[in-house]
Amino acid sequence: MQLLSNQTVDGSSDWVPAIPDAYNGLINIYVAGDLGGGTVTIETLAPDGVTAIPLDGGEFTAATMRVQSAASAVLRATLSGATGADVSVWIEPESVDLRRIVRERI
């Protein structure tokens, strides 16, 4: 599921619902492109249904991929402090099949 697509200015994606079928509650977060000196933060929605809270370990200052525990959370991606960025962010559930494929190739 793509959260940001070629984002060039500071801003947030829409909230996305909890991710079903994630292996052990894990999700894969992919950040690609030029962050323009900014930070991408994956945020979850607080129980009040209004407040955005940064996900522990969910801050990125460079393109990367990370496995994160957060499958039951409502999430969004926020780009901040960027100048001349061109960044995209995706999340997907971690799966047993994906883990098996990676292990077979190592």
Image: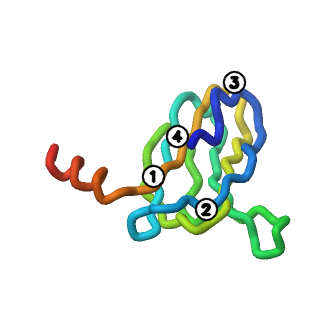
Q: Residue at x 51, y 34 (%)?
A: 32
Label 1 sits on residue:
28
**x, y (%) of residue 20?**
52, 61
Report crowding for label 3: few under 14, some 14 to 19, many 20 or more residues within 10 A (C-alpha). Answer: some
Left or right of residue 1: residue 80:
right
Front disc: 4 or 2: 2
Q: Alpha carbon of mark 4 to alpha carbon of mark 2: how far?
A: 19 Å
Going by the numbered disc 2, the residue's amino acid type is Ala
Report crowding for label 4: few under 14, some 14 to 19, many 20 or more residues within 10 A (C-alpha). Answer: many
Label 3 sits on residue:
84
Q: Which mark is residue 18?
A: 2
- In the structure shown, which secondary structural element does the residue marked by tag 1 occupy? strand
Label 4 sits on residue:
31
Q: Alpha carbon of mark 1 to alpha carbon of mark 2: how far?
A: 13 Å
Q: Alpha carbon of mark 4 to alpha carbon of mark 3: how far?
A: 16 Å
In the figure, residue 90 lies in which quadrant?
Answer: top right
Q: Quadrant of the N terminus?
A: top right
